[in-house]
Image (cartoon, rainbow, N blue to C red):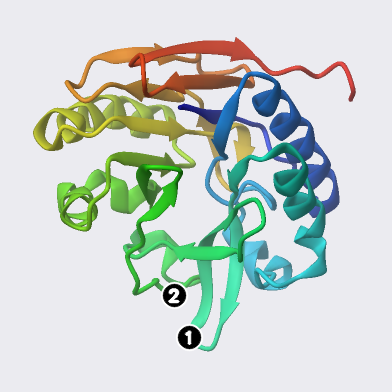
């Protein structure tokens, strides 16, 4: 099975423009044979905590209809990033859209201190299936705690799907931590990070894939948009530039 992580420069608060770019990325991933594509944290709005409340959308929003239509047409599943409104407050969400199935909604369970004024923490772990593969989503800060991955593994997860918005320091720490997750749990890790301006920092890329032994299979650089395609059957991965010809 092929899975794809998209390294993307989302545009601040531009949901319509970001959605159009997501659709082009999904088309490219599907052309490469991917059955699941993951985007960076809050990819549909950009990682912009101060705008999250006004940009939050429920997973039932008609604005996500084009994503569902692409999933249905291409037979691909999509894990995107979006602030989600709940009775407990706005959450850092990951809508997971699948062909012909209801949308799943995962929310970040462990927040960084500087996120607390803007978001509330999720309270439900999630493992979902893509064919026979059991996938556990993780969003940035929480993925740096081995306990999160251990819980996912105990629920049957076979792959750790990580969506982040990380600085250069965060990427370095991630590239140290995620191989240990893979080695200790025997579970490949696929990570998608952003590039370009986000909130008060610069997204530092480094999107990557590690096999179940913790070997780095492929990684992107710190500046360019692109794709990481992980083949879980062959345990290989490759990095590719993002096709921007339609933009």
| Circle 1/circle 2 CB separation < 8 Å | yes
* Label placed on residue 88: 1
The quarter of the rendered structure image containing the C terminus is top right
Tell which of 203 and 59 is nearer to you: 59
The percent coordinates of residue 156 (x first, y second) are: 23, 52
Residue 120 marker? 2
Label 2: few (<14), some (14–19) or many (≥20) C-alpha neighbours in 10 Å: many
Q: Residues within 10 Å of mark 1 (few under 14, many from 20)?
A: few
138 vs 168, nearest the viewer: 138
- Residue at the spot x=20%, y=31% of the render? 182
Q: Which residue is depicted at the point 70% across and 72% down?
A: 60
**N-terminal of the two: label 1 or label 2?**
1
Task: Give the farthest residue toward the bottom.
Answer: 87
Query: 37 or 74: nearer the eye?
Result: 74
Q: What number is the disc on residue 117?
A: none
Q: Position of residue 124 (x, y in %)?
A: 35, 71
- The span from disc 1 to disc 2 (Cα, nearest Å) is 7 Å
Q: Dot 1 lies on which element?
A: loop
Task: Please tell me which residue is depicted at 34% across the width and 65% down the height of the picture.
Answer: 109
- Quarter where residue 160 is shown: top left
Q: Is residue 116 visible?
A: yes
């Amino acid at each position: 099975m092929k899975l794809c992580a998209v390294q993307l420069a989302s545009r601040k608060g531009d949901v319509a423009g970001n959605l159009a770019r997501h659709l082009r990325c999904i088309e490219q991933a599907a052309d490469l044979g991917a059955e699941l594509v993951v985007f960076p944290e809050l990819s549909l709005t950009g990682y912009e905590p101060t705008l999250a409340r006004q940009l939050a959308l429920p997973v039932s929003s008609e604005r996500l209809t084009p994503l569902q239509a692409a999933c249905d047409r291409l037979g691909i599943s999509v894990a995107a990033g979006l602030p989600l409104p709940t009775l407990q407050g706005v959450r850092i969400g990951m809508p997971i859209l699948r062909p012909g199935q209801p949308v799943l909604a995962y929310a970040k369970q462990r927040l960084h201190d500087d996120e607390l004024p803007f978001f509330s923490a999720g309270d439900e772990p999630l493992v979902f299936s893509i064919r026979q593969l059991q996938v556990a989503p993780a969003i940035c800060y929480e993925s740096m705690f081995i306990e999160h991955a251990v819980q996912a593994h105990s629920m049957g997860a076979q792959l750790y799907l990580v969506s982040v918005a990380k600085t250069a320091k965060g990427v370095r720490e991630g590239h140290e931590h995620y191989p240990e997750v893979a080695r200790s749990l025997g579970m490949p890790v696929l990570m998608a990070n952003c590039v370009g301006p986000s909130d008060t920092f610069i997204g530092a890329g480094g999107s990557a894939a590690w096999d179940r032994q913790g070997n780095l299979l492929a990684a992107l650089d710190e500046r360019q948009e692109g794709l990481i395609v992980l083949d879980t059957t062959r345990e290989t991965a490759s990095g590719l530039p993002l096709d921007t010809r339609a933009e």
